[in-house]
Image (cartoon, rainbow, N blue to C red):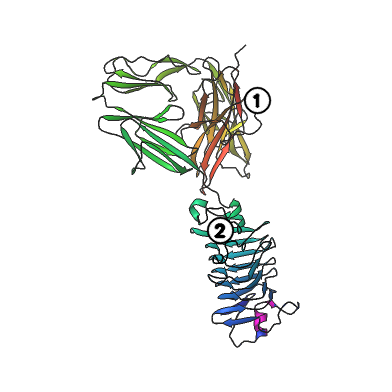
Amino acid sequence: MSVKSGKSIVFVMICVLAFMLSFSVGVFANESPNMAQVDNIFNIQGSNVVINKNVRLFQDTVVTGDLELRDGELDLDGNELVVTGNLIQKGGKIILNGGKLKVEKNYTIGSEGNYPNAYLIMKNENDYIEVKGSFATYSSNSHIGCLTAGTLEVKGDFFQKVDIKKTKYSSNFVASGTHKVILSGEGIQTVEFNSPEYSYMNILCITKPLEEGYNFVNEERVWVKLVKLFDEVPKNSLEVNVLGDGFVKENGEKVLPTSYKYDYEVGTEIELEAYANEGSEFAYWEDGEIGRILSDNPIYKLVMGTGAKLKAVFYQNPEVAEELMVVFKDRSGRILQSTKVPKNEEAVAPEDPYMTGYRFVRWNQDFSNVVSNMIITPVFRRMADLYTVTVTGGELSTGGTEGQYLFDVPVEVVANKAPEGKKFSHWEQDGIKVSTKSTFSFFVPMRDTNLTAVFVDENEVLDTEPFIALSENTIVDHLDHTVIFTATRNMTEGYQLIESGIILLKSYEELQEPLTLETENIIRGRISNDSTSQFYVRKINVEDGATWYGRAYLIYKNPEGVIKTVYSEVTAKGTMELPE
């Protein structure tokens, strides 16, 4: 058994003078008439250090082994007391008084069958207790007004116990004011209150998910306020519905039911594979929210973002089917028409589709004699209108600083060599930052546009975080009743793209709050992670006079594994007003 004061360690033998022992542990005991004299303050019994009279520390102290408080007051008086074994409080009071108490093993106030007259007093904001083992109180005393400030941190289990043979109505752990309990153990921590109606934590701080990191025995809440001290990874749901004769496997192993829904952590990579049963064939994956064909590849990969509703669609095999499925879709994958056609007969196409900036030419397949299940896509040709691209601080990859192009044609610009003392920072398009890559590709908008390479002092620290930009200019097409928004995402090395898109909201009044993924009544225009960095989101079927607002969003994981969601600085809008 040893006791340490400051940096020196004094090994205490049973025969050591009481005065020497008192001094070595930093105990003050002769200023107050309520405090014991130096004689017999500590006793060493077996492997325990025992306190049975009033003690006040006057300096930081370490007790090697167990410390047992049987009676009296132990006042830390702003100092730190470290107990390398267990702290066993069989009676008396422990008063933090602005001090710190660190217990390497368990801290128990009483025990099963022993419900002592004992108190724990924490009334100072600086009061701090760390228990690396478990904490349990069997005190027979009410603690109303005793636990009003400070922090009790426990890494093991937490128990509030009472003598149930006598009463169930004990208030021996009643926290209030600013008092906090932190449960910070690495494993699952059990929490049990025998009297949850009368005893409870005030502010409970948790360091891991509530459902996964803790075992709360009580059905009732045993805290007033819950605070999460960790970056909780949000979860969203994946729904998969099987239409037709087939099944889906997840990650090559788990066979999903025909109607499946499960919550995944954001950022989880998921691989789905569709398998057709005999007499059937896989047709396509469909976005169940907007009726858009995502892929005709049986293997579909996604990263969980804001959630997904998918359909795995199967058709009868043409060898056994009397009728075949013919699907017409637009270039974005939206299903325009899906019909059954008798084998060897002609399908009837829907009305020629329209797309802003293009004219319809034909369908990409002959459907005059249908002999297989078909997915048919329109072929468009760009309109002849030309738009001017002007480059400052760089040049077009084809040479020169100005050129004229058709709408939606890909164009590449390259930044000039940085002037002396400068370095390239980013590209701006019409005053909006769009890319940090010195070579930048984009699609020509339906207007003249200016690209400017921005250079900064070579000592300036550049922001490498991903971002997303939204053009202030929307395309309002009155012929098709469509409003088109244009966004550009900028991903950087070391960051994982989870999801991006544009949030849409109809409003007849100016927005008072920023658009976010939590805004009510929004539509998420989610784009595939395989898309180009610049993309469009179209709001179709916009009624006359309606105004739609859009804001781009980007969800990514940083190198430390933290999930972040960022938004474009610009919120654009388009109103379906008939041209004058």
Question: How many circles with numbers are drawn on the protein?
Answer: 2
In the rendered structure, the answer to whether residue 494 lies left or right of residue 461 reads left
- Give the crowd class for mark 1: few <14, some 14-19, many >=20 residues within 10 Å: few
Residue 264 is labelled as: none
Q: Is residue 20 magenta?
A: yes
Residue at point 43% right, 30% down? 288
Which residue is the extreme one toward the bottom? 15
Query: Is residue 342 at all visible to an observer of this figure?
Result: yes
User: What x and y, as percent, mark residue 486?
Assistant: 54, 27
Residue at point 34% right, 18% down? 365
Residue type, numbered disc 1: Glu
Image: 92 above or below 422: below
User: What x and y, as percent, mark residue 225?
Assistant: 61, 51
User: What x and y, as percent, mark residue 175?
Assistant: 64, 59
Residue type, numbered disc 2: Leu
Secondary structure mainly formed by the magenta segment: helix
Q: Secondary structure at mark 1?
A: loop
Magenta span covers which residues?
Answer: 19-27
The residue carrying mark 1 is 509
Residue at point 54% right, 80% down? 47
Of 414 and 569, nearer the camera is: 569
Residue 183 is labelled as: 2
Task: Tell me the distance, in whole angstroms, between the alpha carbons under discs 1 and 2.
Answer: 47 Å
In the rendered structure, the answer to whether residue 287 lies left or right of residue 536 reads left
The quarter of the picture where residue 71 lies is bottom right
Query: Is residue 442 at all visible to an observer of this figure?
Result: no
Image: 209 above or below 533: below
